[in-house]
Structure formats: structure tokens, C-alpha cells
């Protein structure tokens, strides 16, 4: 088996301004630093597409699955997309407690404490979920949630695994 089939290359993120500045001072086009190799087979993504319509049941299952994958030493991300971005804002997990599980806010904190990452679709953060309260005030993302593009989840699951709730 070709070992490169199980390898992923992670490039540090460079903004267009950083690349432009580097290109302006160099006769050669700037390139990001050499990639790090990680075992792609150990990558796992949990995609959460469901909002509050079911009282948080699917969100609770998704975060529980993410915690389990992280506990199994998988490099796990949660990707909140569509209606699922609802759970990435302050206060939206506070009153969710599905019978048989820890409260949702505790599960999310545990996942982050175990080294998991919670990513939010950057387009959904800005548009899809209309991230504002009834008075039109912009909602604050909960600590530990980072907006990322769809490419982040696709590159993370290249030859890895994923599950959607």
C-alpha cells in the first residue's frame, strides 16, 4: 500500500494580504511554508446540520459522537453548518438537556477540553442562520468556535471519516 494515500498535508493559513506583501518584496511568488504530514485515517468530522427544532436531540447526539471520537484518539472536528450553526452562539446550548446525556453545554465544553475543534461554516455565520436576536443585535460566537469555509471540512475528511446529524 502506498503510504501517501494515508497522508494529508496541512498548510498554514496565509491571508491574501500576507501573500501579496510577500510577493511584493520577492522576485519569486510567495508560497506557504512546507506542509506538515498527518495520518489522514485518524481524522474524523461530525457535521451538525440540525437546529433547535427537535429540542437539541440531534445536537446532543452529534456532540456525544464527537466526544467519543476524540476519546478514541481520532483527530476530530465538529462542523456546524446550515441550521446547525445555531449551537455555535452564546447561550444557545444552556437550556438543552436530553434525558440520558449530560447537558449540551457541558458536552461542548468537554469536547473542546479534550482537544476537539468546533468549526462553523463561515457563510452560515454571516448569512444562512441570520445570526442575530429578535431585536437584530449580532449574536456572539461561543468561545472555542471558529468560522471556516467548507474546504476545511472537506480537506479534514480526505480519506478520513465523517457522520452527519
Image (cartoon, rainbow, N blue to C red):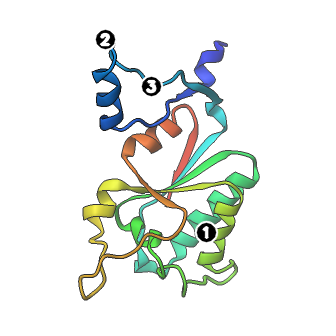
Foreground of the two, 105 or 41: 105
Q: Is residue 148 above or below residue 113?
A: above
Kindly report which numbered mark, 2 or 1, lies closer to the viewer in this rendering: 2
Kindly report which numbered mark, 3 or 2, lies closer to the viewer in this rendering: 2
Q: Is residue 121 above or below residue 100?
A: above
Q: Residue 69: percent from the left, percent from the top?
A: 68, 52
Foreground of the two, 149 or 27: 27
Residue bearing mark 3? 32
Q: Is residue 59 above or below residue 75?
A: below
Q: Residue 154: percent from the left, percent from the top?
A: 44, 39
Q: For the point 67% across and 13% down, which residue is it?
A: 1
Residue 76 as seen in the image, left or right of residue 164: right
Foreground of the two, 3 or 34: 34
Q: CA distance from mark 3 to mark 2?
A: 15 Å
Q: Secondary structure at mark 2?
A: loop
Question: Which circle marks residue 108 in the picture?
Answer: 1
Q: For the point 62% across and 24% down, which residue is it?
A: 6
Q: For the point 37% across and 20% down, which residue is it?
A: 30
Q: CA distance from mark 2 to mark 1?
A: 47 Å
Residue bearing mark 2? 27
Q: Secondary structure at mark 3?
A: loop
**Quarter holding residue 103:** bottom right
Q: Is residue 53 above or below residue 13?
A: below
Q: Residue 152: percent from the left, percent from the top?
A: 44, 42
Q: Earlier in the sequence, mark 1 or mark 3?
A: 3
Q: Earlier in the sequence, mark 3 or mark 2?
A: 2
Q: CA distance from mark 1 to mark 3?
A: 32 Å
Residue 20 as seen in the image, left or right of residue 35: left
Amino acid at each position: 500500500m502506498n503510504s501517501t494515500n494515508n497522508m494529508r498535508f496541512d498548510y498554514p493559513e496565509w491571508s491574501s494580504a500576507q501573500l501579496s506583501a510577500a510577493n511584493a518584496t520577492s522576485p519569486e511568488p510567495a508560497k506557504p511554508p512546507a506542509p506538515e504530514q498527518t495520518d489522514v485515517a485518524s481524522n474524523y468530522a461530525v457535521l451538525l446540520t440540525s437546529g433547535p427544532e427537535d429540542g437539541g436531540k440531534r445536537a446532543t447526539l452529534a456532540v456525544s459522537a464527537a466526544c467519543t471520537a476524540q476519546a478514541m484518539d481520532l483527530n476530530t472536528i465538529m462542523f456546524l453548518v446550515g441550521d446547525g450553526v445555531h449551537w455555535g452562539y452564546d447561550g444557545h446550548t444552556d437550556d438543552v438537556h436530553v434525558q440520558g446525556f449530560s447537558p449540551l453545554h457541558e458536552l461542548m465544553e468537554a469536547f473542546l477540553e479534550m482537544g476537539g475543534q468546533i468549526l462553523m461554516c463561515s457563510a452560515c455565520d454571516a448569512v444562512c442562520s441570520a445570526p442575530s436576536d429578535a431585536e437584530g443585535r449580532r449574536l456572539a460566537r461561543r468561545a472555542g468556535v471558529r468560522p471556516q469555509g467548507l474546504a476545511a471540512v472537506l480537506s479534514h475528511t480526505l480519506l478520513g471519516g465523517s457522520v452527519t446529524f
